[in-house]
Amino acid sequence: MWTRRRLAPILPLLLLAPLLAPLTALADGRPFPPGTKRGTMTPAWHPAIIIDGKTRTLSPAARIFNQDNTIEMPASLRGRDLVVNYQEDADGLILNVWLLTPEEAAQRPVTGR
């Protein structure tokens, strides 16, 4: 049976394992959910964004992730023709947007468009 003396050396590893799991998931790149689409985005006046030349509306729950996978505020976006992956909600509003790194943009989208 496990005793305290035998468990003590591996206890820190057991406690850190849940914290390390997200880091290992990102080691191979960001996991994009099924149904993710690829496009080029140009910021517009909130809540509008332009994807592939069409004006679209951000969902009230929309999140925009930058290349570091942290949330970016829509008003802080600059540039045009940014390569993105995006996800729509059931009403056709844009729910999530991921600004892609050059490496991610060079890869073929897994889920198709």
Image (tube, helix red, strand yellow):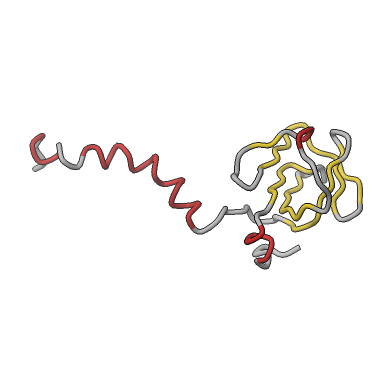
**Quadrant in which residue 89 is drawn:** top right
* Position of residue 76 in the picture relative to residue 102 (left or right): right
Quarter holding the N terminus is top left
Q: Which residue, as the protein is rendered here, is positioned at the far bottom?
A: 108
Between 92 and 49, which is closer to the camera in this rendering?
A: 49
Point 19% across, 42% down: residue = 10
Between 7 and 45, which is closer to the camera in this rendering?
A: 45
Quarter holding the C terminus is bottom right
Total numbered badges shown on the rendered structure: 0
Point 63% across, 48% down: residue = 67
Point 65% across, 37% down: residue = 71
Position of 66 relative to 34 (above/below): above
Position of 110 relative to 66 (above/below): below
Between 71 and 8, which is closer to the camera in this rendering?
A: 71
Instruction: Report x, y in % for residue 7.
Output: 14, 39
* Position of residue 38 in the picture relative to residue 19 (left or right): right
* Position of residue 91 in the picture relative to residue 12 (left or right): right
**Quadrant in which residue 69 is drawn:** top right
Instruction: Report x, y in % for residue 49.
Output: 85, 42
**Quadrant in which residue 47 is drawn:** top right
Point 79% across, 57% down: residue = 39
Q: Which residue, as the protein is rendered here, is positioned at the far right?
A: 54
Instruction: Report x, y in % for residue 87.
Output: 73, 49
Position of 98 relative to 61 (above/below): below
